[in-house]
Image (cartoon, helix red, strand yellow):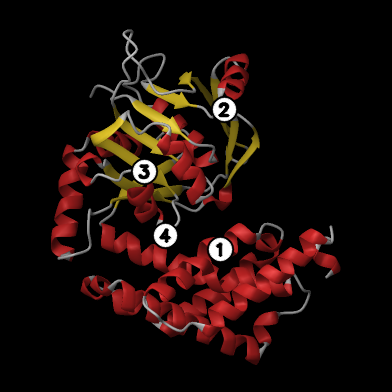
Amino acid sequence: MSAPRVYALGNSPLVYLMCNEIASLSFQPRVPELVLLLQDQKKLNRFLHNESKLVLERPKGGYKGSNQYMASCSPPKFASGEVAKVDNVIIGEKTPKLFTNALKKYTKSIHSGTNVLLLNPTVGLVDILRKNVWHERENSPKVFIGVTNERHISQPSEFTTHLSSYKSSLQVSAVPDTHLGYSYQEDVQQAQELAKTNSLLRLLKSINEEQSGSVFGVSNRSYGDLLLYRYEELITQSCVLPITALYGPQPHDITASGELMKIVRNLVQEFTYTIQATDRFVNQIPHSSGALDQERLVSAVWRALKSDRRKLFYETNFHHINQFNGFFALQAKKRNIKCPFNEAMMICAKAKLELAHDSNFNHRSL
């Protein structure tokens, strides 16, 4: 297999991890067919000063690898000055705004035949991009999403990524142009066909076949199956984040509170109702009733509160509340759905975060 050229864009550590996986494939040339599209000339200069290398480390697993890459900070061009088209792009950023700004810079290079893989995008990002970046549907690229748990991926320095020693997996799915007329059977069939025919998915499949040193796997999923997984994460975080912002890493077990349990149950009820009202095609996906079962989701929230609350406490900010709870608030507003518990939790959590920020206090003092 010859290596198709891939352009990597964005500042997420996951982007650099995927670069390492792709560059480490046996059929790649000495300088991999992978181009880093860096933020600006200053970052490009720092990268060149770093010998044009990205480093991947697994401290507990003893693995350390590095590769040299081609890099630029502007759209690729021919010698004539004409902007060149690109066939494969992977991008990872923290917020929808950063995703949008990064992709706008390369709109002349991205065409209807381009594969664009969005790494850990927020739910709703694809709609934002299709509205603000790819206005004309006939020129819209083939969009894929790749989802994984980033909690074990860190970036201790600008061009170094750490991956914990456990085996992780990136779940990849194509995103349909529309949900109208959605068929789960056709969704599954398309996923199977794309895995065999799409150049980017075939490249990612090679990562599994070669068992690269970082042991980062890639699995191809149908859109519907991956959507259910993402909804569970969305609901869980939309409960855990505001509660974490309000109560912090208290020494006692907040899950023992009956009143807090009532709040979680009401939030889960609002979120599942909103999903079923706005994305009615979800009912066509097998196991959707189980995936959106309220009791099961309440249990998932409870487990997350017990295991993740301390870490999330020091990371939660306005952006996280807007990203998760704000998504449901926006969807509910579009359909005139009342979500009083979500609205109240958003207001209280953001007020607490605002007070901590404006007063220059650590959360622990509030």
Q: Write down the quadrant of residue 57 in the picture.
A: top right
Q: Is residue 56 above or below residue 290?
A: above
Q: Which residue is mark 2?
A: 55
Q: Sequence-wise, which precedes: disc 1 or disc 2?
A: 2
Q: Sequence-wise, which precedes: disc 3 or disc 4?
A: 4
- Which dot, 4 or 1, sits closer to the camera? 1
Q: What is the CA distance from the residue labelled 3 to the residue labelled 4? A: 17 Å
Provide residue 70's location: percent of width, then percent of height: 45, 17
Provide residue 159's location: percent of width, then percent of height: 60, 29
Q: Which residue is mark 4?
A: 123
Provide residue 281's location: percent of width, then percent of height: 23, 71
Element at label 4 = loop
Element at label 1 = helix
Element at label 3 = loop
Q: Sequence-wise, which precedes: disc 4 or disc 1?
A: 4
In the picture, the quarter occupied by the N terminus is top left
- Whether residue 247 appears in this view of the structure is yes
Q: What is the CA distance from the residue labelled 3 to the residue labelled 2? A: 32 Å
Amino acid type at mark 3: Val
- Which dot, 3 or 2, sits closer to the camera? 3
